[in-house]
Amino acid sequence: MERTIGNLTEELRQHSVPYKHLSQRAVERAEVNSLLALIPSLDNDRNNNGSIPRGAIDLDDGFVLLRAMDSCARAITPAEADALQNALDIAEINAFDEWPPCFVRWARLRLPNGQVARSLWKEGQKPLGKVRMARNVKLTYANNLEFGEVRFYFRHKLHSGELRTLAIIALYSRPNTDLLRDSSNTLWTCKKTGDKRLVVVDVKSIEAVVCMAPHSVEMLGAGWEEWVFVVEKPGLEVANLGGAAELVDDE
């Protein structure tokens, strides 16, 4: 809200009747946003003037796979291989001639809402104080709402010739049902599960980037040290209608 007010104020050129002009600018902005939401093809500025960063791959439906990426295919861990095998079994797909497979890892994914979902692969290499911590995501898995930490993204061509873009994600635990019920389904509190809930999903099942904030041990006690709660970006749907997108640099 403060950013919107600031942007509208910057557009004022006649200060004799500022509130009247400010109201008119807000009305015009709302009209433009409504038109672009109805006819997205009119928005020439969306997604950085319709272009994507160097080396990125347009996955359609508003998804863009972004660098950094591996210079060559690399082996995955046994836990990641198990998660991949489970996904293949569920889909009844036999996609690999050699096992375990190797993949070229990708670091980032731009979502249709303009957010950029990152990954543990790259963020884990940086000092904690210099990390944006944008690897926790909201997604749909097995028809359930889930939250998880992205390990990395990768692409693989099936025997049918279909090229799939996938992500390996460590899901958080299911929420504390007592807190969820007492908060009218508002406070989603969960724990990291490590490799226990490691899954492989299509990147288009990812809906948004979220914050997993730790509970205050000082207030709640040492028993809450491993618990975190979900914080979603407020106003994300409205910002998406307005064409707001996170700036993407080349990595």
Image: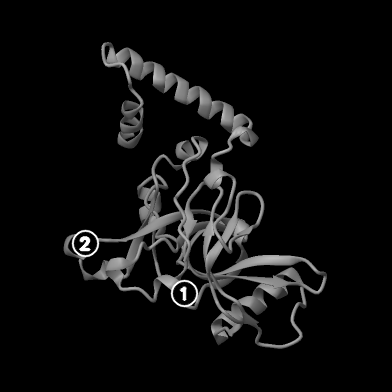
Q: Secondary structure at mark 1?
A: helix
At a point 54% along the width and 39% down the height, the residue shown is: 45
Image-quadrant location for residue 172: bottom left
**Residue 192 appears left or right of 90:** left
In the rendered image, residue 8, in percent from the top left (x then y), is placed at 35, 27
Q: Secondary structure at mark 2?
A: helix
Numbered badge on residue 220: 2
In the rendered image, residue 87, in percent from the top left (x then y), is placed at 66, 72
Residue at label 1?
121
**Label 2 amino acid?**
Leu
At a point 58% along the width and 26% down the height, the residue shown is: 35
Q: CA distance from mark 2 to mark 1?
A: 32 Å
**Label 1 amino acid?**
Trp
Q: Earlier in the sequence, mark 2 or mark 1?
A: 1
Image-quadrant location for residue 100: bottom right
Q: Is residue 145 visible?
A: no
At a point 70% along the width and 74% down the height, the residue shown is: 88
In the rendered image, residue 107, in percent from the top left (x then y), is placed at 51, 68
In the rendered image, residue 180, in percent from the top left (x then y), is placed at 39, 52
Outermost residue, left side = 218
Q: How would you rate the neighbour count of disc 1 (Cα within 10 Å): few for under 14, some for 14-19, many for 20 or more? A: some
Q: How would you rate the neighbour count of disc 2 (Cα within 10 Å): few for under 14, some for 14-19, many for 20 or more? A: few
Relative vertical location of residue 209 with respect to residue 104 in this rendering, above or below: above
Camera-near label (2 vs 1) is 1
Relative vertical location of residue 176 with respect to residue 10 in this rendering, above or below: below
